[in-house]
Image: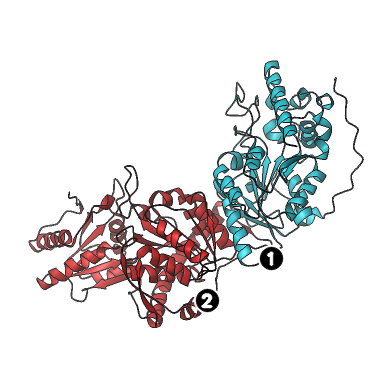
Chain colours: A cyan, B red
Amino acid sequence: MTASSPQSPKPRPPLPYNMREVVLPGDAACPGCPIPMAWKVLSAVFGEKMILVIPACCSSVVVGAYPGNSLKASVVHVAFASAAAVASGIAEALRKRGITDVQVIAWAGDGGTADIGMASLSGAAERNHDIIYIMYDNEAYMNTGIQRSSSTPYGAWTTTTPIIGKTEHKKDVAKIMIAHGVPYVATASVAYPHDLYAKLQRAKKIRGFKFIHIHAPCPVGWRFDPKYTVRIGKLAVETGLWILYEYYDGKIHLSGPSRPYIDPKKRKPIVEYLKLQGRFKKITEDKIKEIEKYVEQHWEWIKRHM
Amino acid sequence: MGKLVALTGNYAVAYAAKYARVDVIAAYPITPQTSIVEKLAELIESGELDAIMIRVESEHSALAATFGAAIAGARAFTATSSQGLLYMHEFVHWTSRARIPAVMAIVTRALAPPWNIWPDHSDFMDQRDAGWIMGFAMDNQEVFDLTLQAFKISEDPRVYLPVMIGLEGFILGHTTMPVELPEQEVVDQWLGPRKQEYVIDGKEPLALGNLAWPEDTEEMFMEIQKAMDNAKKVIKEVDEEYGKLFGRKYGGLIQCINCEDAKYFAVSMGAWSGDLIEAVNKLREEGYPIGVIRIRFCRPFPYEDIWEKVKNSKGVIVFDRSISFGAWGPLFTDLVTGLYHYTNNLPIMSNVVAGIGGVNITYNDFAKLLTSFIETIEKGDKPPVFTWYHKR
């Protein structure tokens, strides 16, 4: 390994929340699922005072079956392409009724965001409704059994890219949202709950449309041992593949966990990230080089906008 | 009393939404619905209507946002036509199956291809399995009255289903007629504040739409069928109350004209019923014993009320302005099935599909079709069960 490891950060205090009061035990998530991990951070910030609008995605199942519900917050299940539109309607109704202490959150996967939900997301962002749109990105259609989405990374195996792997790069939705000129865009990772917590706290204080893109490693779909969800999430950041940042006031603010990796020498080799995941089992040297090139281009873009 | 103004059908819809004091409107323009959205935008921006308009990027989002506003406790409204209605079809079901009161106006227009902006009922009737209460107006006064009544019906605890109100594009939508507008205070008192079974506004944790097992799911939908039955009573009550307060009573689910001593009946829905009534009036003068049953609500389907009128009749002719390809006109099939509840020996029944793609059907066409229908039966022959009446 040529890259030097960054200094290990000092231990962080536990998040100030009673997560089990909102994220109840007994959900229907797979072992190692990143979804409840992120929900616990949401609950730390909003408690019961959030309305989650969930289109068709893994989370539609994870909350559990009627009459049960594993979240002690309000949940509205909606049609696949409609999370941002329904959230717009709820937010405007609450505004009309003078209710200001409840956060409307569209909570959608990468398919519901980057693909089928893109038009309604774009519409809601342009209208600047006072909502937080969270894309939890497990990089494929996991709920239907691991089919390619536009957010699947280059080279990854899925059941609809079964032999060759995906031949296109990942669609960068955060960049698309920045282009909408919304007041707040951030990337985050379930492996960095403090960072996600801080971002949700900032988003909570900003009026208008907020977009947060959460990297969410999926043991089932990415083919890794469920105990490695956090490790893989961290490796994505430490290799520089997934860059944590916030965008507000017209520029990118690199987040703490990603700051060291602006220096390519400090990044771990991308293969460290890839080799833990069965979906990259058949990846070739050429393809790894292509991913490295993509990562470098992405960093250049980040640096230009800081 | 109220004041008499000249309004297009589309403006009558917009004013009814205003009189209902809607909180949130989410809509997307489409010909021939557009002037509803424009009028409502003007009413809001001029300060005459205290509502929020969400100018969405598609019809799918229009009804999705209307649904969102409604579940969060707002009186919500939208309107569309034709392709727009098909594009939002997923949410047509989503709204009713979630038992969310809401009102939508459908300014009816043919479906493409080929592109066609003229009116028929294809878009409207395509929604008939969706669990919405479906009313259809004949003139602009009724457009206003029905749209306003739709809020009352939708928010009745015995119903709690969304309501769509149909009016033909251009024939009503863009044609100006006198419309009497009521006094706002009387409407306020009658309609009252927004009512719905549950509100998702963060006051208490509530989940809507979680995965449900087959038996639970089926029971939820059986409740919709019950609510449809209840709606028959509620629609009649609302018609009565409205008649007392505002002076216009239409007869509930159907309106009957010249029915008292009729031996033959013509059944129709929508604006062309006006031409049909004219034709029947003329035939009456010529001695033909015929009446008109105008369907005001096709969901729930008023087969009981129609049976009461036609049970001793010699023949019933049903005019459909839409076609279920490979079968017949939907009003006809619904009526035949409905009457079969009462008898194995149906009156002679005939279905005429006409006016598709906006083909203009006049008083003369109706007179010709009715005369032929009656005379065929009087001669002891059986008229065709199905005719697609076409002219150019």
> What residue appears at the point 77 percent right and 45 percent down from the top-left corner?
A196
Q: Is residue B328 left or right of residue A222?
A: left
Query: Whole-percent x and y of residue A249?
Result: 73, 46
Quote the CA–CA distance across marks 2 and 1. Answer: 22 Å
Question: Closer to the camera, B292 or A242?
Answer: A242
Query: Whole-percent x and y of residue B1?
Result: 39, 83
Indicate the amino acid at tag 2: Gly
Query: Whole-percent x and y of residue A22?
Result: 75, 56
The reply to whether dot 2 and dot 1 touch (C-beta < 8 Å) is no
> What residue appears at the point 19 percent right and 68 percent down from the top-left corner?
B278
Above or below for B225 versus A257? below
Q: Which badge, 2 or 1, is on the more N-terminal residue?
A: 2
Question: Disc 2 vs disc 1: which is toward the camera?
Answer: 2
Q: Which mark is residue B192?
A: 2
Q: Which residue is mark 1?
A: B203
Question: Closer to the camera, A291 or B46?
Answer: B46
Image-quadrant location for residue B271: bottom left
Query: Whole-percent x and y of residue A186?
Result: 72, 43
